[in-house]
Amino acid sequence: MSTTVAVIQAGAALYDLEAGLRSAERLLAEAAATGARLAVFPEAFLTGYPKGASFGTLLGSRTQEGREEFRRYFESAIDVPSPATARLGEAARAHAMWLVIGVIERGGGTLYCTVLFFAPDGTLAAKHRKLMPTALERLVWGFGDGSTLPVVDTGFGRAGAVICWENYMPLLRTTMYGKGIQLYCAPTVDDREVWQSSMRHIATEGRCYVLAACQYARLGDSPREIIRGGSVIVGPLGEVLAGPVYDRESILTAEVDTARIAEARFDLDVTGHYARPDIFRLHVNEHPQEAVVRGRWELD
C-alpha cells in the first residue's frame, strides 16, 4: 500500500526561534494538505545554518564579536524537551503526521545539530545528534554519539535520519541499513550538484527511499550566504521520484511503498545476503558517552 511523503525545501529566520516555529507550523500544514503522512525538514531548520559566518575565528584567535554571535545562536537554540518541542509535537498531532525536523539543540553549554522525530500523536519519538560536524561546524556544534541512531517504525516504513555529510560516512550508512531503514531521511544544506549523485547512490546501495531535504535560504547578498536547495526524493532502485528543485521554497511529494523495497532487495541486500560477515563485520557502540558519570561505586 502506497503512502504520500513530503520533503520541505525552505529556510527559517536565522537565530529567531519564534519565526522558525511559525514557519514550521505553516509548512507542515501545507504538506498535510497534499495528503502526506510524513514530512522531512532540512538540517538546522530551527534556528538556522549560518552559512558564511566565521564566528570571528582564526587559528589560535577568537574575537569578542564572534563570541557575541555564538551567544545569539546559543540563546536561540532549543532544549529537548522544552516548550518549543511541545509546540512542534502539537503541530504534528494537529495534522496526524510524522514530523522529522532539523534543529539546533542546546545541551548544557554545547550546541548540537540534531534531528527530532515526532509521531502523529504529538509525542517526541526519537532524536539523532549529528556525529561528525564538518569543518568549521566543529567550532559551533558538539559531536553526537552512538546512543542517538534511531530507526523508528512509522507504520508505513522504518524511518531514520543521516545529516548532511554524515552521508559520506560508509559505516554510518551501513549501520542504518543494518537497522532495516526504509525511509532514509537526509536533512542537509548541501546544495551542490554532486549531492544528487550521492542521494541516488545511497538509495541504490541501501535499497531504500531517500528523502533529502535541503534548505532554501538567503542569508545575505553574496553567493556564500545563499543556500539554493536541491531537495529530492529517490526510489529504492535509484530512480528520481521528485525534484531536484533549486532557487525557491518548495514542497516535494512522492508515493512510497515498502513492497517495492522487498523487490529491490531481491538482488542486493548489503547487510543480508550480499554481505560477507565471515570477512567484514561492523561493531557499533550505542552507549552514551558522558564526560561526567555520577553514581555510587563499590570499592573492592
Image: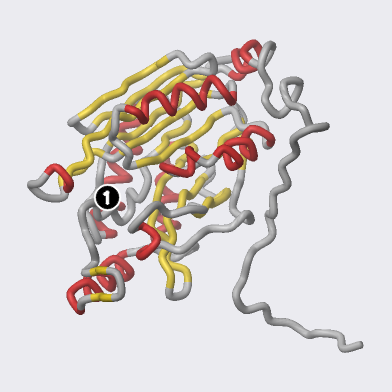
What residue occupies the far bottom of the structure in this picture?
Answer: 299
On the rendered image, what quadrant is the N terminus found in?
top right
Q: Position of residue 272 (x, y in %)?
A: 74, 25
What residue occupies the far left of the structure in this picture?
Answer: 221
Residue drawn at point x = 69 percent, y = 60 percent = 287
On screen, residue 21 above or below 61: above
Give the image quarter of residue 121: top right
- Judging by the rendered image, the residue that carries numbered circle 1 is 22
Q: Position of residue 216 (x, y in %)?
A: 23, 38
Residue drawn at point x = 36 percent, y = 18 percent = 242
Which amino acid type corresponds to the residue marked 1 in the rendered image? Arg
On screen, residue 228 above or below 82: above
Please tell me which residue lies in front, 273 or 126: 273
Asked whether the viewer can see residue 93, the reply is: no
Residue drawn at point x = 21 percent, y = 58 percent = 53
Position of 115 compared to 1: left or right?
A: left
Q: Is the residue marked by circle 1 packed among few (<14), some (14-19), or many (20+) residues within 10 Å? A: some
On the rendered image, what quadrant is the C terminus found in?
bottom right
For label 1, the SS is helix
On screen, residue 297 above or below 165: below
Asked whether the viewer can see residue 1, the reply is: yes
